[in-house]
Amino acid sequence: SDSSAGAQIKGTFIDVDQMKEKVRESLFNPAKKPRDFYKKSGPSQALARSVVFENVTLMIIAFNAIWIAHDTDANHSDVLLDADVKFQIAENVFCFYFSIELVIRFLAFEYKCNIFRDA
């Protein structure tokens, strides 16, 4: 009965050597990024990998966050159709850009099922 209790306790605790191996593995094998799953050639993958595209996207995201704050304070309409033209144009421009970005990144993937991988 002592041997079965010892095996049960041993199975309850973390194996230190196995944990060390996992840490070493994660340090020497960095996590995959979405761009690792992109095609090797073609215009969509080239654009998706582009530093300019990445920086423009980040700039638009930042501007969109600022615009949302302005929109919250200045736009008193409940529906976009009732809002001033500047709010309608801005919302449609952001929607258009983010839709194009989504299409570009989708087309850049070699295997489309990889879009569901967590990076």
Image: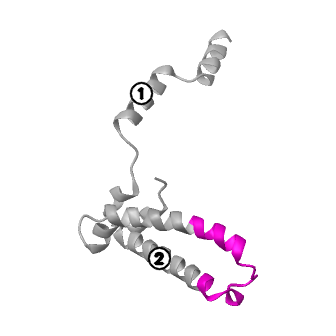
Q: On screen, 5 above or below 23?
A: above
Q: On screen, 9 above or below 21?
A: above
Q: Secondary structure at mark 1?
A: helix
**Residue beneath the point at 68% across and 85% down:** 80
Q: Secondary structure at mark 2?
A: helix
Q: According to the image, label 2 marks what residue?
A: 97
Magenta stretch containing residue 55, yes or no? no
Q: Which residues are magenta?
A: 65-88
Q: Amino acid at mark 2?
A: Tyr
Q: Is residue 39 left or right of residue 96?
A: left
- Quadrant housing residue 105: bottom left
**Residue beneath the point at 23% across and 68% down:** 41
Query: Residue 85: percent from the left, percent from the top?
Result: 61, 88
**Residue beneath the point at 38% across and 34% down:** 27
Q: Nearer the viewer, residue 64 or 10?
A: 64
Mark 2 crowdedness (10 Å alpha carbons): few <14, some 14-19, many ≥20? few
Q: Amino acid at mark 1?
A: Glu
Q: According to the image, label 1 marks what residue?
A: 21
The residue furthest left is: 41
Q: Is residue 25 left or right of residue 117?
A: left
Q: On screen, 20 above or below 118?
A: above
Q: Nearer the viewer, residue 41 or 62?
A: 62
